[in-house]
Amino acid sequence: MRRFYEAFDAQDLDGFVSTLHPHVELQTRRGLRIGFEEARAWATKSDEGGLRQRYVVEDLIEQGNHVVALVRQQWWWMEENELAEDHEAAALFTFEKDLIARWQPFADRADALRAAGLDPGGV
């Protein structure tokens, strides 16, 4: 999972895809993306607006074949290299054969923990 975010942030699309199961499902704001090609297209960043998105992993919580990543989702002004926005978020990863088979982001960390079958108050 750390490689998933590191490759995403660095725009290392080959490295990003290498973390994924061939039939990966990415639940994005623009809908479900399935497979390598759709994942690669989704992960390709544009420089529109001068902002670059970055994820900082704060904690990883395992539950069976699921892992909840507690992250900080950040947007940086590219030209000034200044932080524009930062907030807590989470993602639920589902693994199959040591590869990411599904990624689902959550704005609310408690929702991600519940989706993994964990008690948010007990973590």
Image: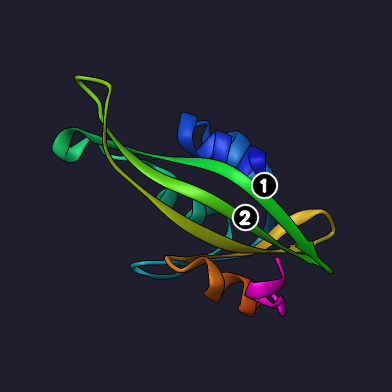
What secondary structure is the stretch in magenta mostly built from? loop
For label 1, the SS is loop
Figure label count: 2
Residue annotated with mark 1? 1
Judge whether 119 appears above or below 37 on screen. below
Judge whether 123 appears above or below 11 on screen. below
Q: Nearer the viewer, residue 123 or 95?
A: 123
Crowd around label 2: few <14 · some 14–19 · many ≥20 (10 Å): many
Which residue is rendered at x = 47% and y = 35% of the image? 9
Which badge, 1 or 2, comes first in the chain's sequence?
A: 1
Residue annotated with mark 2? 69
Q: Amino acid at mark 2?
A: Ala
| Residue 19 spot, x, y in % from top left | 68, 46
Part of the protein shown in magenta: 116-123
Which residue is rendered at x = 46% and y = 58% of the image? 89
CB atoms of marks 1 and 2 within 8 Å: yes
Query: Is 16 left, or right, of 60 in this rendering?
Result: left
Crowd around label 1: few <14 · some 14–19 · many ≥20 (10 Å): some
